[in-house]
Image (cartoon, helix red, strand yellow):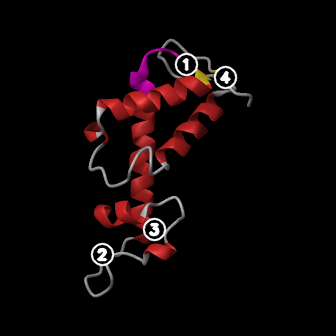
Amino acid sequence: MPEGEQIEVGFNEYNQPNDGKTKDLVGFLGSLARTPNQLPIDMGDWREFPTETKEEIWKLIKKKFKVNDDTKDTLKSLGKKWRDWKSNLKKKYYDLDPDSADALPIEQLESRVNAHQWRNLV
């Protein structure tokens, strides 16, 4: 997509994306949720993210997409994707067995996972 061009996303009366571009927005939010320098996995809760961080994320979204100015639903969706990402990582890589290592070696984790953040998470 050329620099400065935005994808227009249609919304219904409940502020939910509801057109053919929805998958583009949802995919982009999923990518953001898995980006450690944007949304670190070692934060305890979505509500703990500083307002400044959420505002920067919103600017990124607005740069790529023409979306409603109501950030609440879009950021709520992003927060859920971020929680799901953390949950899936822990399910896949974390071992609760006290006789084994707490977590797989960092080298075995997905490349999108920051090693320092992973150690803090587990």
Q: Residues within 10 Å of mark 1 (few under 14, many from 20)?
A: many
Distance, label 4 to label 2, CA atoms, is 47 Å
The first of marks 4 and 2 along the sequence is: 4
Q: Which residue is mark 1?
A: 67
In this view, the residue farthest toward the top is 13
Where is residue 100, by image quadrant?
bottom left
**Residue 83 image offset from top left, x and y in percent:** 38, 48
Q: Is residue 98 at all visible to an observer of this figure?
A: yes
Q: Which residue is mark 3?
A: 92
Where is residue 104, by image quadrant?
bottom left
For residue 83, above or below residue 55 = below
- Position of 37 compared to 51: left or right? right
Distance, label 2 to label 1, CA atoms, is 42 Å
The first of marks 3 and 4 along the sequence is: 4
Quadrant assignment for the C terminus = bottom left
In this view, the residue farthest toward the bottom is 99
Kindly indicate whether the residue at mark 1 contacts the one at mark 2 (C-beta within 8 angstroms): no
- Three-letter amino acid code at the position of disc 4: Gly
